[in-house]
Amino acid sequence: MSQDTPYIFEASTVDFDQSVIENSFHKPVLVDFWAEWCAPCKALMPMLQQIAESYQGELLLAKVNCDAEPDIVSRFGIRSLPTVVLFKDGQPVDGFAGAQPESAIRALLEPHVQMPPPAAADPLEQAQTLFDEGRFADAEATLKTLLSEDNSNAKALILYARCLAERNELSEAQTVLDAVQGDEHKAALAGAKAQLKFLGLAADLPDVADLKTRLAQNPLDDEAVYQLAVQQLARQQYDAALDGLLKLFIRNRSYSEGLPHKTLLQVFDLLGNDHPLVTAYRRKLFAALY
């Protein structure tokens, strides 16, 4: 049987005292007495390996092939297979013979073995979740801590810039984006830069109410259609903005030297290729082009 993790190993007469008895003074060692001809042994072993792996090093699993190691079998008086014995502080402290359900084995181990603490959540994933939930201040605080330890993390820098943009710190956000190195996160970087651009443009445009009034009076006011789309993009109203830009492109594709088409492509960068709106509007844009 092959070794699967650093916590699982074969034990033999030569090394049993060191690998099992001595090790058990540091970590509990579960010893699985098995043989090649024993079908229940082969059914039990994968379960024992899974249990040992779940303890992430807090429990060791030693496998003793009884056909190859008769001295160990006789030393511990093993009479039937499978037999499993738990060693702690140099002594056998518990065990069982025959197949057992996983719940029974875990119940046997519980008084003797500490479960490892759950792995801490990845701070970057945590920050992304907070950002996606609109909790921008919390996301920013998490990212500040992360970046204080590693200020070259491109993904963290891009997300941090987007947090700054959400509170209109556009020049600071631009400085952060300019510090991003490498091409690994090219699409995310392009998206964050597009968001900054839309927020910057929106600051100098008429407000939404004025633009909607203009369009109520003249739905073919191309400038008002474009400016309203930019305001919507700055407010992350992507569906409405994409719809307006596409209609403007279809009606007047040469408006401002092809600006609606260029802006559509920037929004695709901002949202990323996997976004359902990007999939839908890429198809519509392709149909309009060809």
Image (tube, rainbow, N blue to C red):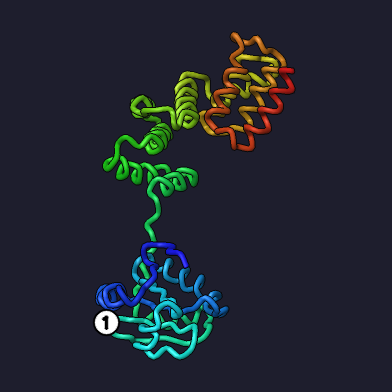
Q: Is residue 249 visible?
A: yes
Depth order, front residue of 285/13: 13
Horizontal side, residue 241 vs residue 30: left or right: right
Horizontal side, residue 8 vs residue 217: left or right: left
Give residue 207's position: percent from left, percent from top: 53, 24
Quarter of the image for residue 241 reads top right
Say which amino acid is labelled 1.
Answer: Gly
**Residue behind mark 1:** 90
Mark 1 crowdedness (10 Å alpha carbons): few <14, some 14-19, many ≥20? some
Give residue 267's position: percent from left, percent from top: 56, 27
Q: Quadrant of the C terminus?
A: top right
Residue at horizontal 46%, vertical 28%? 186
The image shows residue 87, relative to residue 135, as above or below, that is below
Quarter of the image for residue 176 reads top left
SS at mark 1? loop
Q: Is residue 210 visible?
A: no
Quarter of the image for residue 200 reads top left
Horizontal side, residue 20 vs residue 1: left or right: left
The image shows residue 224, relative to residue 125, as above or below, that is above
Residue at horizontal 34%, vertical 80%? 112
Give residue 82's position: percent from left, percent from top: 49, 83
Residue at horizontal 36%, vertical 83%? 72
Give residue 141's position: percent from left, percent from top: 34, 44
Depth order, front residue of 82/261: 82
Depth order, front residue of 244/266: 266
Residue at horizontal 35%, vertical 74%? 12
